[in-house]
């Protein structure tokens, strides 16, 4: 008898916990940034995330936390903003394409470093001095420089102009 009451209490606590969790799942609010009609360029900012933006009134970036999203305004912790007032959004850490570019740049810089180190070791081993390192220096610097240039190609900002859209999306399951 005591074991069945304990199981019933455990079931009741789990059921209450599931109901409390499921109420957050019914509604979704987020800011959607999209370049043209290309769905691969979509970036999504949800409530509780940092949002770094430039507005029409200020010519510098402001970082704030998204508190709520209404039909036509974004409620931030220290500001209220309309999408038409945003000139650009800083997306360097948000855009998933940047991680690919960063990895590719590290690959180029690492290859240049390894190639140069291999040239030094090979010159020391075969000739006993560093006279032959100049043969591998050009290619090493080229690989390292290419990796550095690729690292500068990362997407830094989403400009709100032309086909670029900022949409406030509110989905309710009620």
Image (cartoon, rainbow, N blue to C red):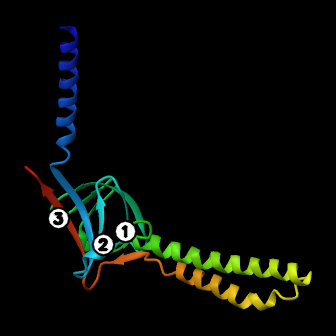
Q: Quadrant of residue 149?
A: bottom right
Image mark for residue 90: none
Q: CA distance from mark 2 to mark 3?
A: 13 Å
Indicate the quadrant where residue 36 lies.
Answer: bottom left
Q: Residue at x 19, y 55 (%)?
A: 28
Numbered circle sitting on residue 53: 1
At 47% from the left edge and 77% from the top edge, which residue is drawn? Answer: 154
Judging depth in this view, the residue of 76 and 108 nearest the camera is: 108
Identify the element where label 1 is drawn: strand
What mark, if any, has residue 72 been given in the picture? 3
Q: Residues within 10 Å of mark 1 (few under 14, many from 20)?
A: many
Residue at the extreme left of the image, as rendered: 174
Q: Position of residue 15 (x, y in %)?
A: 17, 30
Residues at marks 1 and 2 touching, judged by CB atoms closer than 8 Å? yes
Q: Position of residue 91 (x, y in %)?
A: 40, 70
**Tag 3's secondary structure?**
loop
């Amino acid at each position: 008898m005591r074991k069945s009451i304990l199981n019933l209490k455990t079931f009741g606590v789990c059921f209450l916990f599931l109901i409390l969790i499921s109420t957050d799942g019914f509604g979704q609010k987020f800011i959607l940034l999209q370049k043209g009609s290309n769905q691969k360029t979509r970036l999504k900012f949800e409530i509780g995330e940092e949002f770094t933006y430039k507005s029409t009134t200020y010519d510098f970036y402001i970082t704030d936390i998204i508190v709520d999203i209404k039909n036509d305004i974004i409620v931030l912790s220290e500001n209220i903003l309309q999408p038409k007032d945003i000139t650009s959004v800083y997306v360097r850490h948000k855009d998933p394409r940047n991680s690919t570019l960063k990895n590719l740049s590290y690959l180029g810089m690492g290859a240049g470093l390894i190639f140069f180190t291999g040239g030094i070791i090979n010159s020391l081993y075969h000739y006993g001095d560093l006279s032959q390192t100049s043969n591998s220096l050009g290619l090493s610097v080229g690989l390292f420089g290419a990796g550095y240039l690729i690292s500068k190609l990362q997407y830094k900002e989403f400009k709100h102009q032309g086909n670029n859209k900022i949409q406030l999306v509110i989905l309710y399951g009620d």
